[in-house]
Amino acid sequence: MSIFYFIFAKKITIYLKIIALNLSNNARKNRTTGEIVNLMSVDIQRVQDMTTFVMLFWSAPLQVILSICFLWKLLGWAVVAGVVILVAMVPFNSFISVKMRNCQVEQMKYKDERLKMMSEILNGVKVLKLYAWERSMENMILEIRGKEISVLKKLAFLNAATTLSWACAPFLVQKNQYQFIYVAVLTFAVFVTVDPVNNVLTPQITFVALALFNILRFPLAVFAMIFSQANRHSKDEVLQK
């Protein structure tokens, strides 16, 4: 329950800073209705998600380090092949993260614009009805919404690419049965190829290695989510006004 009290307190703080006349006149001019709504919903949700994964800042690296150490003891130099794949994935995921961040900024811009226009329409609804501007206002809002949806589609594709890369890289996927992919296959292949006589892929080695590979799935998958939720600049900027 403490997390709900924390989120509620954050919303109250933003309300007091923005709604209860605590913002300076200069800050009022720079903050639209859409930005206020985003602060009360999107940014607070990011903080809530961040509190869920905050313990992973230390536990996830520890899980990764221990798993790799055990794999090194079990498979030897063959683990290097898997590590190389993980390192090679870093530039790809960094590129995707930058693109996603740009899409989020663009989407927030269109959302702010749409909410600001909706607020103006609701405030001047009498004039709107008097001059029969409903259709033209509707088209303007739909045009902005169309741009926002276009950005959301692009963001969804980028998010799918990131999710796919982190889901495939952690070595095995469990659907109806375990399937070997990427690092598991490469690591086992290198393990057998280096010394075919002594490096025998026995069930004891295989299943222990797969268990360690599976342990790596969760910490590797949440790394991207942790860093994506770490940005609280937009909320802190307003709270410091």
Image (cartoon, helix red, strand yellow):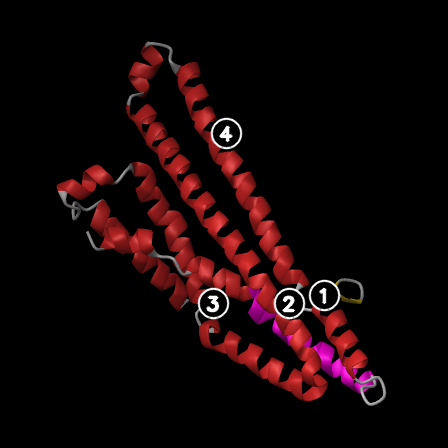
CB atoms of marks 2 and 3 within 8 Å: no
Q: Is residue 212 in sight in this rendering? A: no
Residue 113 position (above or below residue 163): above
> Quick one: SS at disc 1?
loop
The residues bearing labels 4 and 3 have C-alpha atoms spaced at a distance of: 33 Å
The residues bearing labels 2 and 3 have C-alpha atoms spaced at a distance of: 25 Å
Residue 168, x across and y down, in percent: 68, 62
Instruction: Tell which tag, 4 or 3, sits nearer the viewer.
Output: 4
Q: Residues within 10 Å of mark 2 (few under 14, many from 20)?
A: some
Instruction: Classify residue 139 by image quadrant.
Output: top left
Instruction: Tell which tag, 2 or 3, sits nearer the viewer.
Output: 2
- Name the kind of residue labelled 3 in the image: Phe
- Of the two numbered discs 4 and 2 on the same chain, state the one appearing first in sequence: 2
- Name the kind of residue labelled 4 in the image: Gly
The residues bearing labels 4 and 1 have C-alpha atoms spaced at a distance of: 39 Å
CB atoms of marks 1 and 2 within 8 Å: yes
Residue to which mark 2 is pinned: 85
Residue to which mark 4 is pinned: 146
Residue at image point 36% right, 37% down: 112
- Of the two numbered discs 3 and 1 on the same chain, state the one appearing first in sequence: 3
Instruction: Tell which tag, 1 or 2, sits nearer the viewer.
Output: 2
Residue to which mark 1 is pinned: 182
CB atoms of marks 4 and 2 within 8 Å: no
Instruction: Tell which tag, 3 or 1, sits nearer the viewer.
Output: 1
Residue 45 position (above or below residue 121): below
> Quick one: SS at disc 4?
helix
The residues bearing labels 4 and 2 have C-alpha atoms spaced at a distance of: 39 Å
Residue to which mark 3 is pinned: 53
